[in-house]
Image: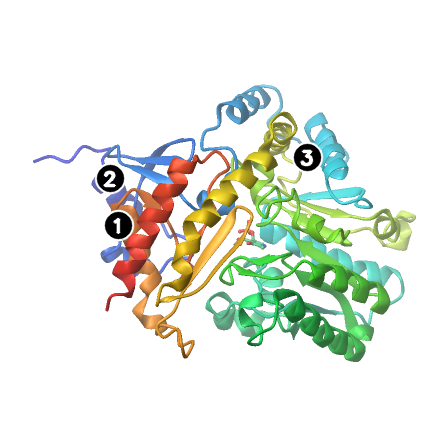
Amino acid sequence: MTIPASSNVALAARDLKHLWHPCTQMHDHESVPMVPIVRGEGAWLIDADGRRYLDGISSWWTNLFGHANPRIAAALAAQATTLEHVIFAGFTHKPAIELAEELVRITPPGLDRVFYADNGSAAIEVALKMSFHYWLNQGHGEKTRFIALSGSYHGETLGALSVSDVALYRKTYAPLLLTPFLAPSPDAYLGEPGESPEQTAMRRLGEMRALLESHTHETCAVIVEPLVQCAGGMRMYHPSYLTGLRALCDEFAVHFIADEIAVGFGRTGTLFACGQANVTPDFMCLSKGLTGGFLPLSAVLTTTEIYEAFYAEYGAGKAFLHSHSYTGNPLACRVALETLAIFRDEPVLERNRQLAAHLARRLEPFRDHPNVADVRQAGMIAAIELIADKARRRPFPVAERRGLRVYLHGLQHGVLLRPLGDVVYFMPPYVVSEAEIDLLVDVAIAGIERAVAN
Ligand SMILES: Cc1ncc(COP(=O)(O)O)c(C=O)c1O
């Protein structure tokens, strides 16, 4: 029998001959299938053999309004035949200008400056460098350190990885990295018995205060993922932590960097997670959903006060230096504008509230499952944390890779789930229907039952 050249088997074989994939031990593909996707449609991905997969994780949390969304695709096509790219130093263009205006309009008040980069990690590099450089320009070159939260993830370039605390990504490269001060995460799952999420947040703010009291003189900024520490296992915390952190950063004169790369654009129920605490950070990093999942683009928003610390005669040497060839790419900016126009034209957040309520109703019964330690949700992000022994809070041994079993079960049943360790989570595109949410949950639960049974 001859295998068609565009079949799953043929494409996977060609891929594995030359490609090296991210976040992958390539050896796994001796037993885990490589899935060649040829088309996307709404919340679905379609492989070369015509099999369909419901994208339960928005393709690494990027997609908002469906794969190959016709409205965004048309905007991209029109831009591609008008202006594909232009150097962004000394030159500008309408998509970049209009996108900056729109971002300033929709983000918390006081964020009036926009600096573009290409992806989430690059946005973090920009924010870290800008914070350090601000203090240097203010005569505080002694401020060279950052404070991050335990369990945080901010990307995998060296600066972003430096302020991340997920051992899987960080441990190997630790000798190359900056060493931040780590403050304990306000993660509600790690709260003391009987403590409410808000009480956990308050206690953790006390620990942050102690850290700032000792290190404020050498600290540039505190960096956090507002409300949900995503790659660290969809760990969630109370918004009062952000309010308290804003006050502490003001009191101790350090910057507040909000990494909304994963949680921005409606994922947690509000347009930005910071909105739930009514705080304006000094830097807000955006990417992923910014282009609806179409193209890599990121933006760092900051205040006029910070911008002005760099604004001086050329000879003063105060200019911010961080240059990527594709900064402010017109295609990506145009696609981002169309994505934001959908938020304006359609009741996206209201619809998400209904979908999130449906998801919550469907997950509620599994709280009592003997191998479920926690069910948690923030808007359109929900997670089920698996556990070997609930009474003793003993996790499964990492080497057993229970989450991988859920992933494989999902693939067999037409659902893309990609657990983070033993945390099975849902972060679907906003175009998902209630029936599709039912499918996601049903397949996940069946997968969990299989995964936890020896
Ligand atoms: C909170 C957060 N920050 C930064 C990043 C890095 O973004 P990118 O993968 O585009 O470099 C991610 C990626 O998952 C993220 O979740």
Q: Amino acid at mark 3?
A: Ile
Q: Nearer the viewer, mark 3 or mark 2?
A: 2
SS at mark 1?
loop
Which residue occupies the extreme left position in the image?
A: 1
Counting residues from the start of the chain, the first of labels 3 and 2 encountered is 2
Q: Nearer the viewer, residue 240 or 44?
A: 240
Per the model, the C-alpha gap separating discs 3 and 1 is 41 Å
SS at mark 2?
helix
Neighbor class of circle 1 (other Cα within 10 Å; few <14, some 14-19, many 20+) is: few
Image quadrant assignment for residue 269: top right
* Label 1–label 2 contact, CB within 8 A: yes
Q: Which mark is residue 33?
A: 1
Residue 73 location, x and y as percent?
51, 25
Per the model, the C-alpha gap separating discs 3 and 2 is 39 Å
Q: Which residue is mark 2?
A: 8
Q: Along the horizontal axis of the image, is 94 left or right of 329?
A: right
Counting residues from the start of the chain, the first of labels 3 and 1 encountered is 1
Per the model, the C-alpha gap separating discs 1 and 2 is 9 Å
Residue at x-position 48% and y-position 39%: 429
Q: Cβ of disc 1 within 8 Å of ligand 1?
A: no
One can see residue 326 in this view = yes
